Image (spheres, grey):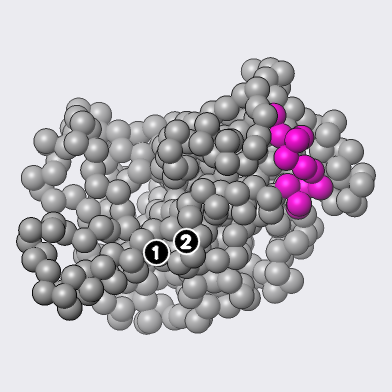
């Protein structure tokens, strides 16, 4: 069943906080839900479908629905990391098309940055009190510990995998195979910073140069500190509705309808050791979305691309068909991703590299900025003129091990 035109995004909201010292995770979910409802011109009684992932506390959909006081007839808690919200929009469109709900709420929220601050404060307090750190165990960190029941753990944990190492492996392989350089990867961060300077809520608003990036401290060869995304609290929400409801809301507000045109999702994993690090699951999810939408990469005017690291963006550009495999390095050079300058404006809010990566999951903010562009509501300095077709792509997991890609194509109508 094609989902082209079966649902529209009618509400979108990004939490302004980047450090939630006084807000719980469920409160953040509630805040972004209210923000999206207000943006759509709806009330919570209009919501009959709810979607969230592993960032939601307790029993996920049930816990948050209870906290919000929602009466629902459809829920979905698909969990695939940072790409989950993109899959949720597709699943919501499918639920709407099959009559399971009429108006779906999708939320994402978390506070890893505040958790890190709390862990540091607790460790400092224990040290000042003369506490036995060895007996009390290590301080709590911002990332969840690995699942002890995960079958891959026994095979991978002895080698000390870490998120930055797994992405560095991909970057190193791309450099070896295609001659990609650190300077070319740096152009991706440069473009993000050019956009972030106009976002008052962005964590990193300073414009950087290629030299700034390659001269920043090495984190995991060949990735430097400025090749890595920010860690932030907050979150976001979107509301997906039947086209008839979307058109009525558009009539009332004067805003354009943001129609779902194409969707795709695909996992990639270790494949029993036969794994090629030169491509991501976006090579599979992208063609599905383009085929459903009936458009090509050349038709896309704006792209929200998952940017946990600079190499993540470069891989998606190639795998989604914006350039040929191995040519991503040349494609991103000389400001080609900068709005008003380059051929393909990307992440005009500053993205995860500069603005926001809430709950260590960047898929939601990718959808939200694409909606802003299609509505003509991005910052004037980065707004793509007459933007009518946009793409959002997410990568949940890690490129070098296992991940799920989600691709969403939206049109202003």
Q: Does 203 lie within the magenta span?
A: no
Callout 2: SS: loop
Q: 379 or 318, which is in the foreground?
A: 379
Residue in view at x 70 percent, y 37 percent: 240
Residue in view at x 62 percent, y 41 percent: 68
Q: Which residues are magenta?
A: 37-48
Figure quadrant of the N terminus: top right
Decide if residue 275 is on the left or right side of residue 370: left
Q: 218 or 89, which is in the foreground?
A: 89
User: x, y (%) of residue 304?
Assistant: 57, 53
Figure quadrant of the C terminus: top right
Q: Does 43 lie within the magenta span?
A: yes
Q: Which disc is residue 233 wearing? A: 2
Decide if residue 352 is on the left or right side of residue 270: right
Q: Quadrant of residue 112?
A: bottom left
Q: Which disc is residue 113 wearing? A: 1
């Amino acid at each position: 069943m094609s989902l082209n035109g079966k649902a529209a995004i009618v509400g979108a909201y990004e939490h302004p906080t980047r450090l939630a010292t006084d807000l719980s995770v469920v409160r953040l979910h509630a805040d972004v839900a209210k923000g999206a409802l207000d943006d759509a011109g709806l009330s919570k009684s209009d919501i009959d479908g709810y979607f969230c992932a592993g960032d939601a506390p307790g029993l996920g959909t049930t816990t948050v629905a209870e906290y919000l006081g929602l009466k629902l007839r459809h829920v979905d808690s698909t969990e695939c990391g940072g790409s989950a919200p993109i899959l949720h929009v597709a699943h919501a469109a499918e639920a709407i098309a099959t009559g399971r709900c009429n108006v779906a709420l999708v939320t994402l929220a978390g506070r890893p940055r505040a958790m890190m601050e709390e862990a540091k404060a607790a460790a400092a307090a224990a040290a000042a009190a003369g506490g036995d750190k060895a007996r009390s165990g290590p301080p709590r960190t911002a990332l969840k510990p690995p699942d002890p029941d995960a079958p891959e753990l026994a095979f991978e944990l002895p080698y000390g995998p870490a998120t930055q190492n797994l992405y560095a492996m991909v970057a190193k392989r791309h450099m070896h195979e295609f001659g990609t350089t650190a300077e070319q990867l740096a152009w991706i961060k440069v473009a993000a910073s050019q956009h972030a300077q106009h976002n008052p809520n962005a964590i990193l608003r300073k414009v950087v140069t290629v030299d700034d990036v390659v001269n920043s401290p090495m984190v995991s060869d060949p990735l430097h500190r400025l090749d890595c995304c920010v860690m932030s609290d907050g979150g976001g929400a979107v509301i997906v509705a039947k086209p008839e409801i979307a058109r009525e809301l558009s009539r009332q507000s004067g805003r354009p309808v943001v129609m779902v045109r194409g969707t795709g999702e695909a996992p990639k994993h270790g494949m029993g050791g036969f794994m090629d690090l030169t491509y991501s699951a976006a090579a599979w999810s992208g063609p599905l979305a383009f085929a459903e939408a009936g458009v090509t990469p050349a038709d896309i005017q704006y792209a929200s691309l998952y940017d946990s690291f600079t190499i993540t963006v470069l891989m998606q550009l190639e795998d989604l068909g914006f350039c040929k495999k191995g040519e991503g390095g040349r494609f991103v050079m000389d400001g080609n991703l900068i709005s008003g300058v380059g051929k393909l404006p990307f992440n005009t809010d500053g993205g995860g590299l500069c603005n926001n990566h809430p709950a260590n999951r960047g898929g939601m903010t990718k959808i939200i900025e694409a909606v802003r562009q299609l509505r003509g509501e991005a910052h004037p300095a980065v707004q793509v003129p007459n933007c009518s077709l946009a793409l959002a792509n997410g990568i949940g997991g890690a490129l070098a091990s296992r991940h799920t890609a989600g691709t969403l194509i939206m049109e202003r109508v």
